Amino acid sequence: MTNARTITRRGLIAGGTAAVAGATLLGGCSSGGGTENTSEVNSSVALPAYVPYTKVKADLASTDEAVMAAFRKFPAGDIAATESKPLASGKPLTILTNTNVQLPPALNDNKYWQAVNDAAGAELQFTMATAADYTAKLTVVIAGDDLPEVVALRPVGDLPKLLEARFTDLSEHLSGDAIKKYPGLANIPTVSWKSCVYNGGIYGIPLNRPAAAGEMHARLDVIKSKGANPEPADYAEFLEMCRTVNDPKRNRYAMGSPQSTLNFLKEMLGLPQGWGVDGSGKFTHVAEREEFRQALDAVTQQWSEGLFHPDSFTQETLLAQWVGNGNVAINNGGAGSVAGYYTTYSANNPDMEMGILMPPKWDGGGDGTKLMGPAIYGGPIGITKTTPERLEEILAFFNWLASPFGTVENRLLSYGVEGHDFDFKDGDPVRNQTGVREVTLPVNYTGAPAVVNFTPGRPEATEMYYAYQERCAKSKQPLATQGLYSPTQQSDGAALDKSLTDGINDVITGRKKLADFDGFVNTFKSGGGDKIRTEYEQAFAATQ
């Protein structure tokens, strides 16, 4: 699973939603004298038509929006997705985006960057920041009134107003059948485009991601070596597995992030991602549910037992490394995907076996709920206002970045320069250490194709992941706030969520008691949570 994975598209309404690492961030406030950013207005936007790419055929077809098309082997041959260099004028393109890994070598020392520039037709001039620092960086750039041509957007204050004033409404070029001019973009599932709609228009390009929110990655080789069961049938068996694997004296811990485990337990209990909605349109936040306290109490007990890496809260950037090195057996995310772990860590650990844990129901009896996300990373990738000629070039550039999996263009963008960044091994492209360093250029955080399920050299991992996603499809729970607008969530949501998360962490680590959690929830509600609830309920009613 490189940065290409596919999901069939479903759904119709859109409305300024975005997500970072599974957390839902809702767009906007009123746009002053322009079009009002409301769910009712946004629901009328014609989303881009979905036109699946047919020149590369998957081994296992997508059967649901939660199930990506899968490839056991890298497609043979040289299939070109585009006919010419997209930035035909040769004018450099300025880009502001984030990276989730180390910064790449500079242009002069990076053959991958040089090759990408050559293929694009012009120099790509990146301004980069780490994911943790990106929103702050974006805010500074916006305040400095010097926006680049391409910007990875986040839910900053007054985002709809900023979009209308400074960014391009792409509806004319991308709505409905208009997108067929750009086959790479037309291959992106509809669900991801929903998060690009504000002010009654399409204000950006999505970075497509899997629809299922979060994956509990597991070092199956570590779990099996301890004689533990990697397919727990209920919470009790999950806890027993963790206790069996845990071995602090050997610097081996069952779990990494307490927050990711809390999310996993939420799925065991059938809880929503953030806000849930019932049949009457009433919204309830997950933290208000009694079952959430049950999950929080369980994680608190796990922490007190020492089942988590002791530095989980203070060195979160090392979580992927801990899993890759076998110091942690279970963690949500980290290297991004099973393929990411194999690509980065298997060279020094040829016996590594990665898997994904499916949440069982708490008391057994089958699979738990699998929460669906918005199938987008971060937020829309916006294009600042420009001339019609330049806009045409930039859209062609995004279409090039979205070149489908298996094409010549995608091979370059995903793996780098053959013989320098990667080599073919038994027909599959495999990055070397040079590629691991150079291909950290945040090209795939600027634009990306529809994602597919592929792990180089490991067809068994591809099949495992496909089977996991088929199970997800059978127990999926949609994101209740997808396509809904809440101005209070836009302006205050991040601070409210952080306050609630801080309270959760205080309970887990023993700084506060579980009984204190009601106080954190009441503060959340009185500080804006109840207002967000009302806004979501009104927005939901407007779309019925």
Image: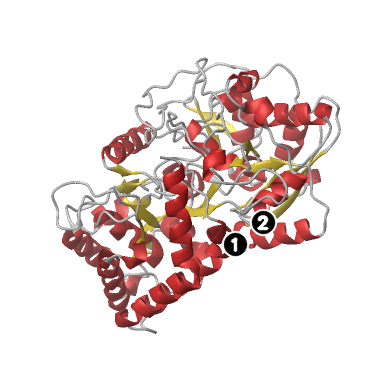
Q: Residues within 10 Å of mark 1 (few under 14, many from 20)?
A: many
Q: Earlier in the sequence, mark 2 or mark 1?
A: 2
Residues 80 and 352: in front is 80
Which residue is at a point 34% across and 77% down the rendered structure image?
A: 518
Q: Position of residue 528 (x, y in %)?
A: 50, 68
**442 above or below 496?**
above
Q: On the rendered image, what quadrant is the C terminus found in? A: top left
Q: Residues within 10 Å of mark 2 (few under 14, many from 20)?
A: some
**431 above or below 171?**
below
Residues 171 and 376: in front is 171
Q: Secondary structure at mark 2?
A: loop
Q: Are marks 2 and 1 in contact (CB under 8 Å)?
A: yes
Q: Secondary structure at mark 1?
A: helix
What's the amino acid at mark 2?
Answer: Asp
Q: Position of residue 158 (x, y in %)?
A: 67, 56
Q: Position of residue 516 (x, y in %)?
A: 35, 82
Q: Position of residue 482 (x, y in %)?
A: 46, 45
Colour scheme of the picture: secondary structure
**426 above or below 488?**
above
Which image quadrant for residue 292?
bottom left
**109 above or below 239?**
above
Which residue is at a point 37% across and 84% down the rendered structure image?
A: 512
Residue 513 appears left or right of 133: left
Which residue is at a point 64% across and 48% down the rendered structure image?
A: 437
What's the amino acid at mark 1?
Answer: Ser
Which image quadrant for residue 156?
bottom right
Residue 235 appears left or right of 220: left
Name the residue carrying label 2.
158
Name the residue carrying label 1.
491
Residue 362 appears left or right of 263: left
Q: CA distance from mark 2 to mark 1?
A: 7 Å
